[in-house]
């Protein structure tokens, strides 16, 4: 009995020692965690001066890891060297929400504010304006110049059969379907997505204008866009567009050739800027001096006003027009009147 009592006393002492040690270790751990928390918390809310005291642009590619993002921020002088940003991201629970894209970080922002920007995807958006009447080649030049992708890649995508099928375009390219407008683009944005934005914007505008097939000549939607693109290239004067559209629709109704220079230019592979008689006599699917009716597709991407002009042309019997060399045109009802206008304004220039 005495021996058992002694064993219980020893066991009790041992248990007490373990409890005491556990309490001591717990206190140490608590102290360490408290110090770590204060250290990390102070870091999280301390404004950063940033390198050279100016805004820093940082492009984070898709798929970049947390460690990779931390290295980019350090390399660009956004945060100081060390692992505190990594720990902050993990402990805050934001590490899995960081998004790719281009960001602008300003002096005075705290590490936590920077982390929140990355988690909310507050990326920089750049305005890119596509002028009315821009064709796919010019559009590819604009996007390539802005470093949104390679020119040839955009041209390839604009002719991609899969994309054409996806957007319901029964043509060889998206010419005419890439709506000219101002777009807010992101650095590193997928070129397919950029093209999709322009196609969807065009679809939205056409829906707002109504059924394109509801026109006086019974043209298909594709033909309306084709004619609208010609109107777009022929004049930059808003009030002339319905008149230009009426001239071409009158000529189509009478089975007259359109005889419009912009279509000829579009069909040439090496146009030097000055249209010649040889150009006018060169057979292409777009040479409306040689073919009857409309060319096979748009020659540019028309804006809203040019599409509306085809749907609602002016009421007139004009069949000809010629440039007055001031941005406007003289319109004529017959060939005699037109020839006199050509002599007056163009000194023997060709007819339109």
Image (cartoon, rainbow, N blue to C red):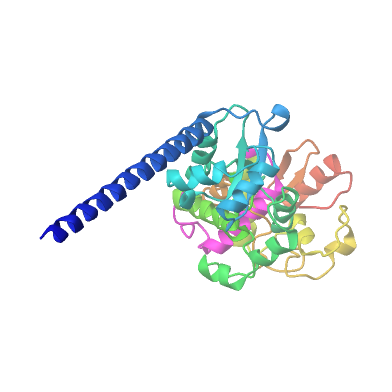
Q: Is residue 288 left or right of residue 272?
A: left
How many marks overall?
A: 0
In percent of width and height, residue 188 lies at: 63, 53
Where on the picture, by quarter, is residue 172?
Answer: bottom right
Seen from the viewer's position, the closer of residues 162 and 317 is 162
Residue 199, placed above or below residue 77: below
> Does 342 appear in magenta?
no
Seen from the viewer's position, the closer of residues 189 and 138 is 189
Q: Is residue 39 left or right of residue 335?
A: left
Q: Residue at x 75, y 55 (%)?
A: 262
Seen from the viewer's position, the closer of residues 34 and 145 is 34
Residue 43, placed above or below residue 242: above
| Placement of the N terminus among the 4 image quadrants | bottom left
Query: Most extreme residue toward the front, as rendered?
Result: 2
In percent of width and height, residue 263 lies at: 74, 59
Where on the picture, by quarter, is residue 50?
Answer: top right
Q: Is residue 267 visible?
A: yes
Q: Residue at x 73, y 41 (%)?
A: 330
Q: Is residue 186 visible?
A: no
Where on the picture, by quarter, is residue 328?
Answer: top right
Query: Most extreme residue toward the left, as rendered?
Result: 1
Q: Is residue 293 left or right of residue 45?
A: right
Q: Which residues make up the magenta segment?
A: 209-238
Q: Residue at x 77, y 56 (%)?
A: 261
Q: Residue at x 59, y 61 (%)?
A: 192
Seen from the viewer's position, the closer of residues 22 and 144 is 22
> Does 222 appear in magenta?
yes
In percent of width and height, residue 235 lies at: 70, 44
């Amino acid at each position: 009995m005495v021996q058992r009592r002694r064993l219980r006393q020893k066991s009790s002492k041992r248990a007490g020692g373990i409890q005491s040690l556990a309490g001591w270790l717990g206190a140490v751990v608590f102290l360490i965690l408290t110090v770590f928390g204060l250290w990390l918390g102070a870091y999280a809310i301390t404004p950063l001066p940033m390198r050279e005291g100016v805004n820093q642009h940082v492009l984070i590619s898709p798929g970049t890891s947390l460690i990779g993002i931390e290295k980019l921020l350090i390399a660009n002088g956004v945060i100081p060297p060390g692992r505190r940003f990594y720990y902050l991201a993990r402990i805050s629970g934001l590490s899995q929400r960081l998004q790719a894209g281009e960001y602008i970080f300003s002096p005075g922002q705290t590490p936590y504010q920077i982390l929140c920007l990355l988690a909310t995807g507050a990326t920089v958006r750049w305005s890119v304006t596509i002028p009315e009447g821009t064709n796919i080649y010019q559009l590819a030049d604009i996007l390539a110049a802005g470093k949104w992708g390679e020119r040839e890649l955009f041209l390839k995508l604009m002719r991609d059969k899969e994309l054409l099928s996806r957007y319901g375009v029964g043509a060889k390219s998206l010419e005419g379907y890439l709506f000219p407008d101002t777009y807010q683009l992101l650095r590193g944005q997928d070129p397919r997505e950029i093209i999709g934005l322009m196609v969807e914007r065009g679809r939205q505008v056409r829906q707002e204008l109504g059924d394109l097939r509801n026109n006086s000549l019974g043209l298909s939607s594709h033909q309306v866009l084709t004619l609208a693109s010609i109107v777009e290239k022929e004049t930059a004067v808003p009030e002339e567009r319905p008149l230009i559209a009426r001239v071409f629709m009158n000529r189509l109704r009478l089975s007259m050739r359109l005889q419009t220079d912009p279509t000829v230019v579009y069909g040439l592979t090496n146009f030097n800027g000055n249209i010649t008689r040889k150009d006018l006599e060169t057979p292409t699917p777009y040479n409306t001096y040689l073919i009857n009716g409309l060319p096979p597709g748009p020659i540019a991407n028309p804006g809203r006003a040019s599409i509306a002009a085809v749907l609602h042309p002016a009421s007139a019997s004009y069949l000809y027009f010629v440039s007055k060399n001031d941005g406007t045109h003289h319109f004529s009802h017959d060939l005699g009147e037109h020839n006199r206008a050509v002599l007056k304004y163009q000194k023997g220039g060709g007819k339109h």
